[in-house]
Image: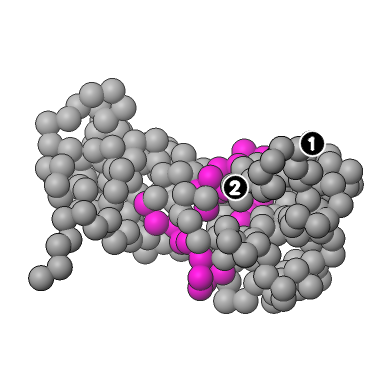
Amino acid sequence: MADNRNRAPQESENLIAGRNAVRELLKSGKTIDKLYILKGARDGLLTVIFGEATRAGVPVVESDRATLDRMAAANQGVIAQIPEREYASLEDILALAAERGEAPFVVVLDCVSDPHNLGAIIRSAECAGCHGVIIPKRRSALLTPSAVKASAGAVEHIPVCKVANLSSAIEYLKENGLWIYALEADGQPYDGVDYKGGCALVLGSEGDGVSRLVRENCDFVVSIPMRGKVNSLNVSNAAAVVLFEVAKGR
């Protein structure tokens, strides 16, 4: 019989784990079906979360550590169960830009598979003022508890759109006036580009970068010059560098 004691829990998209992530969820006013909190723990932020959940009428269940760990890794003693997550549409993202009176600023992720990278990129995108993040339905990390926790709650404040075909999504963005920039190693320096107007930054997977078909649909290729002996950055770090350059130029 297989030993499952050291196997990571199978994460579900309708769970949000971690103190900061759950606090941001409560602040957002979105529906929470149930809150699971570590039995007997009322220290610091857990006390605040317990009180806010109670005042909001959210059912609170006290659970032992083993139960919480089976539900989600690195839960910090609190897990929120939400209805099935609703992803935004491409139209929602453009509508948000219009509502703000701004040219659309979008991030497109080409099969980023690590949920921590996904969450970190969403966090940077929200902080940089992006209007949405686009991910593919297949071969990509999704909004599991690990991704949501890595976003530090940013996922509650920025639309995330899941599409069947990235190339088609990029074509839709282009039809709506956005210029598409792929971040790859062989492009022009990222800090010498004019990003005014609608734009989308395309980031590739951790191992293979931007796929050929997606790259062919991009208008420009930009890169971050490397000064050291290591020739690349982690995708979430690279995203942060370029996103804030784009934000500065806008």
Label 1 Cα neighbours within 10 Å, binned few <14 / some 14-19 / many ≥20: few
Q: Secondary structure at mark 1?
A: helix
Q: Nearer the viewer, residue 76 or 106?
A: 76
In this picture, residue 35 sits left or right of residue 181: left
Q: Which residue is mark 1?
A: 248
Find numbered disc 2 in the image and state the secondary structure of the residue it sits on: loop
x, y percent for residue 209: 65, 62
Which quadrant of the figure has residue 54? Answer: top left
The residue shown at (37%, 51%) is 145
48 left or right of 136 in image: left
The residue located at (46%, 61%) in the rendering is 142
User: Magenta segment: does it hold 121?
Assistant: yes
Q: What is the quadrant of residue 191 in the picture?
A: top right
Point out which mark residue 45 bears.
none
Labels 1 and 2: the sequence-earlier one = 2
Q: Residue at x 34, y 36 (%)?
A: 19
Residue at the (78%, 50%) spot, across then down: 223
Taking the magenta stretch, the answer to whether it contains residue 218 is no
Q: Is residue 22 above or below residue 131?
A: above
Amino acid found under the numbered disc labelled 2: Asn
Q: Is 144 above or below relative to 152?
A: below
Query: Magenta segment, which residues?
Result: 118-145
Q: Position of residue 26 (x, y in %)?
A: 37, 40
Q: Nearer the viewer, mark 1 or mark 2?
A: 2
Task: Estimate the x, y position of residue 220 in percent, counting from the top left.
Answer: 84, 60
Q: Are marks 1 and 2 in contact (CB under 8 Å)?
A: no
Residue, far front:
229
- Where residue 87 appears, x then y in whole percent? 50, 63
Identify residue for label 2: 234
Q: CA distance from mark 1 to mark 2?
A: 22 Å
On-image quarter of the C terminus: top right
